[in-house]
Amino acid sequence: MLLEVLQRYWGYDGFRPLQEEAMRSVLDGRDSVVVLPTGGGKSLCYQAPAMCLEGLAVVVSPLISLMKDQVDALVSNGIPAAFVNSTQTGSERSRVADDLRGGRIRLLYVSPEKLVQDRMIEFLKDLNVSTFAIDEAHCVSEWGHDFRPEYRQLNLLRENFPTLGLHAYTATATERVREDIVKSLGLRQPDMLVGAFDRPNLIYKVERRKSGLAQVREVLDRHKGESGIIYCTTRADVDKLSCELNGQDFQTLPYHAGMPDDERRRNQESFIEERCDIIVATVAFGMGIDKSNVRFVIHYGMPKALENYQQESGRSGRDGLEAECVLLYSGSEMVRWRNMIGESSPGPAREAAFQSLEAMTGFATGVTCRHKSLVNYFGQDLLADSCGACDVCLGQLDLVEDSLVIGQKILSSIFRQDQRFGSDYTAMVLKGSKEQRVLQNGHDQLSTYGLLADAPQKSIRDWVEQLVGQKFLRKEGEYNVLKITDNGWKLLRGEVTPKLLKPATATKEKRRAAVIADSWDGVDRGLFDSLRDLRRMKAGAMNVPAYIVFSDTTLRDMARRRPTTIAGFHSVKGVGEKKLADFGEEFITHIVHYCQQHAVETDTIPPDPSAKITIVDYEAEEAGPNVSALAAFRLFREGKSVTEVANLMSRATSTVAGYLSDFIRHDGVADPSPWVPAELIPRIEAAVRKHGCDRMRPVFDELNGEVSYELIRPVLDCVRVRMHFGVEQELKVGS
Ligand code: ADP
Ligand code: ZN
């Protein structure tokens, strides 16, 4: 039933992680808290069940602009939906009310302030409401970064609709916020569905801001013709940067709360409708923008909380395709944020703000895998040591060469100071400071006094923080006293080496070309671009955002398959029945025309990376592919060999060979030729046919031990895939 609805209205052929569980919870009328990262597909968790249940599903959403987009998107898929909020005229509202009374609406979006009015509650009681979905549910908690008082009153729902399921959805929730959500909404033993926070398709990079403009340009140059957001912390920065970029042949538009309303709205629309690729904005921009094909987000300044960074950078790559997130930070803004928070009134909110700022600073100045530090903050961990998709793991940081010695000097000073002091003090001792406190404690007599006199004191302090980040040290108590951890003792014994950044001033310009693997395999770029134009035209005519017509993923798949028939078009990822009816003919005509003109082959069945076919029990395994594996998958899709991938990722070939095997199953690859010499494939296949694909040993023996297991395995895996799809006869085990 659910799958049927997904296919029929959305053109999707499977669930994203936890979606099915979340949907079951709605169908079964339990309560739930669903925490999935941006782009994880939360909306579908309540939208799809709404189409299976009788009656009306009510969605509480705080973002008025998002509401309209969501409703537009639903209607474009053939789902009767509407919204009620303060932007509507009286007559618009009464039309919606009529439709609701007539049972003609399946999904209703309401702002929280409207919902909690007595009249609204009474009105809803007279309708056949099936379930409530509460979007952006972290707004209910003072510990969240986006507390909204009107969310507190949503406990009214439980009182007034005691028999209905309540479902809370959010992308950011620490343990404490989660508990708050359950308590404030009065949820009853909710299903707690917390997804993996990591967004493996995002590539994170952090740089200290130097010549800001040049750093920004470098990123833009990598993303010609693609959509992206540049976030600034002040309005002045927005105006200045936007102007400067426009003066250098980039086309950007500014966006901030100080601009006239209509200009601001126009700029936002230009971005969404793809008349302009780059928007330079304050954080006022983006709430409620769910444009799925944002390919990069640059932070020209550091946000004040790691939650904000996660949310803002997370606006890229919602379609699951690769996107790049670059953070440019400076020391002075860290101080500025600290002062600003210090001026707010004391209480839990301020304490939370300080903690979030601390985490943000740690993320920016640290040298631990960015993916890892983000998910750690949200109480999760990554299996792999290296994600293959951040500056740290890609080896792009400028590290000091003698980091072991420096680390040892710092730790032994801390040890000699009896582990009773914090980072600032430790830096003073190592610098050889004549500060009163140091002299009073007699620490100028320590053998470590002045041991790092050549380095700026600020850098020594940064190194200490980096050692904390890598868990060689931990901070304890109110005064953040430094203690050496077990790991730290290993460092002192020289068994492990820390990563320490070169001092800012000494940083050489060193940049490697970013390794951005992309899912463009088989996509005809020219056709894609012309389909994009067609999409823009259609969207303009219908007065909806471009991505509501089709997402980038869908356009790429179209330009990959190049269908000329209705059936072919229907098999494009993201084409449901309504879209097929609305756009099929016109897009097919366009494709036919383009392909004729450019002599491009049509109706190809792609060895398609993104139209991923879920097979075998891989996805059913609890953990799913880890981040390293996913990074390797990207490279395999580009046709890289095992050795090449092993080198790029600094991994053992045997590990990478394992990833290849997973990859073949994961993507349903039927042809082993990128990884096995062509002349060997028929021989190996013959041996596999003879002996079955349960064990490799008989195959190895059959080939007289002349072919290595590493070559046999991919062939065997591909045979399995073909069997699974019925392309290959079921093989008998043994001969
Ligand atoms: P979130 O609200 O969690 O940020 P969305 O609900 O906006 O995420 O979904 C992100 C994108 O993923 C959307 O373009 C959506 O249509 C798409 N999507 C969601 N679920 C699926 C699925 N099961 N298969 C394919 N695409 C999906
Ligand atoms: Zn990493």
Image: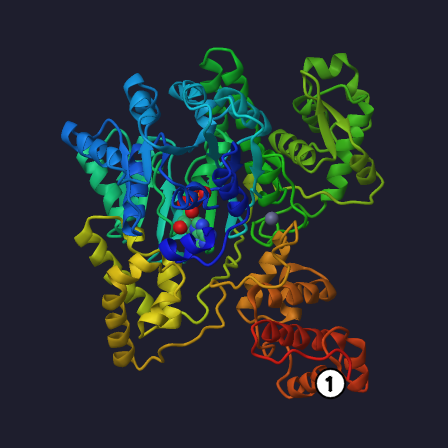
**Residue at 39% over, 42% down:** 50
Q: Please say if 406 is above or below 644.
A: above
The amino acid type found where label 1 is placed reads: Lys
Toward the right, the furthest residue is 493
The image position of residue 108, as x and y in percent, is 32, 35
Quadrant of the image occupied by residue 188: top right
The image position of residue 649, as x and y in percent, is 64, 59
Query: Which residue carries the number 1 mark?
Result: 690
Q: Please say if 506 is above or below 140.
A: below
**Residue at 31% over, 17% down:** 118
Quadrant of the image occupied by residue 479: top right
Q: Is residue 439 left or right of residue 362?
A: right
Q: Nearer the viewer, residue 56 or 22?
A: 56
**Residue at 25% over, 80% down:** 597
Helix, strand or loop under label 1: helix
**Could you tell me which quadrant the C terminus lies in?**
bottom right
Q: Nearer the viewer, residue 610 or 514?
A: 610
Visible residue check, residue 487:
yes
Visible residue check, residue 314:
no
The image position of residue 640, as x and y in percent, is 58, 70
